Image: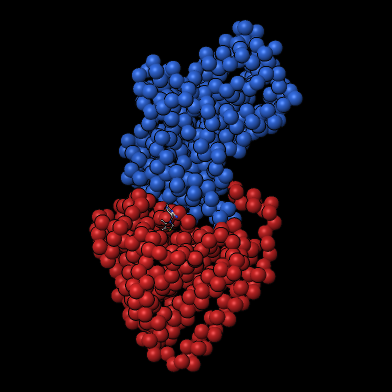
Amino acid sequence: MTTVEERTEPGGRPLSRDELRSFLREMLLIRRFEEKVEERFRAGELPGFLHVAIGQEAVATGVCAALAREDVIASTHRAHGHAIAKGTPVERLMAELYGKVEGCSRGYGGSMHLYDLEVGNLGANAVVAGGIPGIVGAALAFQMRGEARVAAAFFGDGATNTGTFHESLNLAQLWKLPAVFVLENNGWAESTPASQHLPLPVEKLGKRAAAYGMKLIEADGQDVEAVYLAALAAREHALSGKGPVLLHLRTYRLTGHYVGDPQVYRDKEELARERATRDPIELLKARLELPDDDWAALDAEVTAEVEAAVAFAKAGTDPKPEDALKYVYA
Amino acid sequence: MPELTYREAVRDALRKALREDERVFLMGEDIAEMGGSMAVTQGLLEEFGPQRVRNTPISEMAIVGSGIGAAIQGMRPVVEIMYEDFLTLSMEQLVNQAAKHRTMSGGQVRVPLTVRTQGGAGWSPGAQHAQQLEAWFVHVPGLKVVFASTPEDVRGLLWSSIYDDNPVLFFEHRTLYPIKGEVPEELEPIPLGKARVHREGEDVTVVATGRLVHEALRAAEEAERDGVSVEVVDPRTLLPLDEETIIASVRKTTRCVTAHEAVTRGGFGAELAAVIQHGAFDWLDAPIERVGAKFAPLPFAPVMEQYVVPHAEDVYEAIRRTVARG
Ligand SMILES: Cc1ncc(C[n+]2csc(CCOP(=O)(O)OP(=O)(O)O)c2C)c(N)n1
Ligand SMILES: [Mg+2]
């Protein structure tokens, strides 16, 4: 991987084959991780409930690759990819999903509350849009202290209908904060299609930036290189003092809203078409013209990593019940 | 000892923290040039500039939420919600985010945020500018709740709230801003979770908060004339609560009245009564009496407003009821 300095040169530049291959590896790791999580959930091993982001891996990978380690993110209920891409080891993530002390939130969080302060993950959030204002505050702290860092919030198309979203973007623009608002637009809010929750066409959702006078940067969320370059440009703009950016990425959710969702609301043909034409991993694999053995080796590598994560998690320590009260106050 | 008004005492704590600590800054609606709707932050913009005394848009969710984000990054923000009625607009960030980050992260995150707000009846603001909502927040693990009733307390407790590593809801009472009181020359921090015994007595304990501390002290004088000796305790911090001081007082006096301006039903008095009956059951000689507002949204017309909220006479009557039990 290149250094931050190289990566932030104005306008970015096309990525080398090696860089793209490393993106492919991470996206595949996220994919295999989430498939495994689905499998283990169905086997009854994981408590609670889960949302996977299968089909949206290029967003997590492209955006987080453009961020520096000292930049921070806030994530959503669909959080595994963001957490992996920001740098949390998969075994600590898996351990969290198993509710173990070794988990990235020590078993207190679960799938929708993945935290890892060390790598700048300020937490996934189970309240739609709940993490956005905190990112405004983090960006404010960076600005007040003169630190060259950005704060980025992930959220979906559904989240843009909340008052929280509006208040946060308005304030961030007013104070020209170094924030990037990553709109992960998959066209669905649970079972509700964009046509039923947005008063404007789904592909025009980025227009909301104009209401705040905010810089809008858009990219195809299924093309990791496009995402990465757009995120680099967004980061650069946010750091320049010109204010925050709405980074609008069109993507697609190739599975149900939650694991086990029968998806009665979704047209099977549409899904099949998207699966065949817009899977970000297949797109990148085809573009790289990866030889079969190379692909197989890559797959075997990440699959082994995920298996090791499951073994690590299963061998993990169960929290003591009374430790439930340990972190209520600092 | 110098005298300050309650308003000046709040300002004094803010000014000292702003002077001594770069991490401290203020955000809220109309707090800069105007000095806040209660004139508490007057003069601070001039001294500390617009970076550290920030007017915000009318965005209660973003005010609290950005305070949380800055706090997690190591700042010590003090945000102001103009009226506590408007806390309702920031409930999500207070209850789901500020209170829970630390536990949800398995202890990785600290949220040293102070949320100042004010409310209280007595000036006919109507139903949406005078509620007393402090009890709502006592129900939320992860928050701390402070309600000071005197200049000395408000100054020392605000300081401790700013320097607490947890989110603190800091309630001020609108009608107390002009009251004067002696304060130590130098600001003395008052630890959270410590009650103040305002007046010692033998027969009845009144545990009161906010404006009702002053009403309780008046009622105590009235009762004294009848030969009833009243102890008045102000918990000052509702969460965490100084159960020890309160229980010790009731064990001594054997009777108890709780008093606050918030509606009685589900109010903080209910929590106090539960704590006291458990800690002093064998000592109690009478049922615990609760004084609070009648169960109605605050009406506008002064006669109706005064009818709804409690006064010294209500505390006095409650004291009489407890001693009447023999
Ligand atoms: C404030 C709030 N309302 C409702 C929900 C229930 N809910 C969870 S996810 C979701 C849809 C969110 O849609 P979007 O923001 O587009 O994200 P996506 O699920 O598509 O990733 C809803 C309604 C919630 N978690 N929080
Ligand atoms: Mg969506």
In the depicted structure, whether residue A137 falls above or below residue A261: above
Q: Quadrant of the C terminus of chain B?
A: top right
Note whether residue B104 is visible: yes
Residue B54 rendering spot, x and y as whole percentages: 36, 45
The number of numbered badges drawn on the structure is 0
Q: Is residue B247 left or right of residue B154?
A: right
Q: Looking at the image, which residue is at 53% across and 30% down?
A: B267
Q: Looking at the image, which residue is at 48% across and 22% down?
A: B294
Residue B286 rendering spot, x and y as whole percentages: 67, 18
Q: Colour of chain A?
A: red
Q: Colour of chain B?
A: blue
Residue A233 rendering spot, x and y as whole percentages: 32, 70
Question: Is A144 or B77 nearer to us in this picture?
Answer: B77
Q: Quadrant of the N terminus of chain B?
A: top right
Q: Is residue A297 left or right of residue A60?
A: right
Q: Looking at the image, which residue is at 51% across and 84% down?
A: A299
Q: Looking at the image, which residue is at 33% across and 82% down?
A: A14
Residue B157 rendering spot, x and y as whole percentages: 54, 35
Q: Residue furthest right?
A: B282
Give the quarter of the image for residue B257.
top right
Q: Is residue B76 left or right of residue A14?
A: right
Colour option used: by chain
In the depicted structure, whether residue A25 falls above or below residue A188: below
Q: Is residue B215 left or right of residue A186?
A: right
Give the image quadrant in which the ligand numbered 1 is located: bottom left
In the depicted structure, whether residue B220 falls above or below residue B58: above
In the depicted structure, whether residue B34 falls above or below residue B256: below
Note whether residue A229 is visible: no
